Amino acid sequence: GTKLVEVKGLKKHFEVENKQILKAVDGLSFDIYEGETLGLVGESGCGKSTTGRTLINLYHCTEGQVLFNGQDVHKMNSKQKKAFNRHVQMIFQDPYASLNPRMTVTDIIAEGMDIHGLFSKKKRLERVYELLETVGLNREHASRFPHEFSGGQRQRIGIARALAVDPSFIIADEPISALDVSVQAQVVNLMKKLQKEKQLTYLFIAHDLAMVKHISDRIGVMYLGQMMELTTSDQLYDHPLHPYTKSLLSAIPIPDPNIEEQRKRDILEGEVPSQINPPSGCVFRTRCPVATDVCASSKPDWTEVEPNHFVACHLYS
Ligand code: SF4
Ligand code: MG
């Protein structure tokens, strides 16, 4: 496939209290292909959202590079930035907090269209009606306010808002985590349908593997600001290599009692260490059931151990 996004050695560090450095994103390298969904998972605080925000230049990067269609997103002039801001949209975790409660649905959805001067006043409302139908709502909803909707409906409004400017790349930051389980699948199915219709590329961020399974072509697993493993969804579920991925998978309940028995052994213990003082060597070593001496003294390389399967672990290098 064609690379839409190329991430090269990306770091985003924040200075916190007492001049300490918090390494939120610490050396990521991966590509996102046109038309795919790349799932990005890891426990909360592992740097997923910061990665998303740095990818689209909401944050400057500390080091490294992000190319979008070959263009460095952290080195754009204002004209390039404006075009980029249209191509790239975000869908947020909390549809309650991300919609302005004082704006009507029409004004929420049309805000980006207005900023980019995309539609005349007359066409604007038609466009909003069309978008509402696209996301499974209807024109009667246009004059209402966010509080009149359920969580799932609000996320649909958030999706309509993102689609309004005809983007090619959407970063969905935990778009279903705040929703009832019964509604999650509906939103995922809607996103899949829209992806096909509009040739969208997604970065789909979630905190557990169960949520990304049905939408992702490939999945990247993050831990403490670093990528542990990245491969196709099938490969990741059927043949995970990294000990952290294996422990995340063991947390997903499986109906078959025999398999359940097997997987229980991998369940993760201990707390996530601080990003201010991450462990030396492999950052996962303080929780890794198979760590050895070399894991403390040297950081494992990000290695393509088989085609399209990347792992950072001494067991495979
Ligand atoms: Fe575990 Fe060592 Fe692999 Fe890290 S490098 S995941 S500590 S075995
Ligand atoms: Mg987050």
Image (spheres, helix red, strand yellow):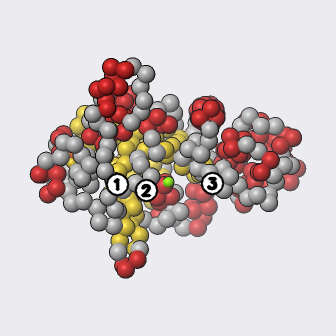
> Which residue is disc 3 drawn over?
86
Using residue 70 as the reference point, say whether residue 292 is left or right of it: left
Residue 272: numbered disc:
1
Whether residue 21 is visible: yes
CA gap, disc 2 to disc 1? 9 Å
Q: CA distance from mark 3 to mark 2?
A: 28 Å
Q: Looking at the picture, how far across and down is residue 242, in whole percent?
A: 27, 40
Label 3 crowd bin: few (<14), some (14–19), many (20+), radius 10 Å? many
Q: What is the three-letter code of the residue carrying label 3?
A: Arg
Q: Quadrant of the N terminus?
A: top left
Along the line of sight, which residue is nearer the eye, 244 or 9? 244
Residue at far left of view: 293
For label 1, count other residues whose C-alpha is less than 10 Å away and answer few (under 14), some (14-19) or many (20+): some
Q: Disc 1 to disc 3, how far (Cα)?
A: 36 Å
Instruction: Give the numbered dot on residue 107.
Output: none
- Residue 184's place in the image compared with 31, above or below, is above
Figure quadrant of residue 108: bottom right
Q: Nearer the viewer, residue 68 or 179?
A: 179
Q: Which mark is residue 45?
A: 2
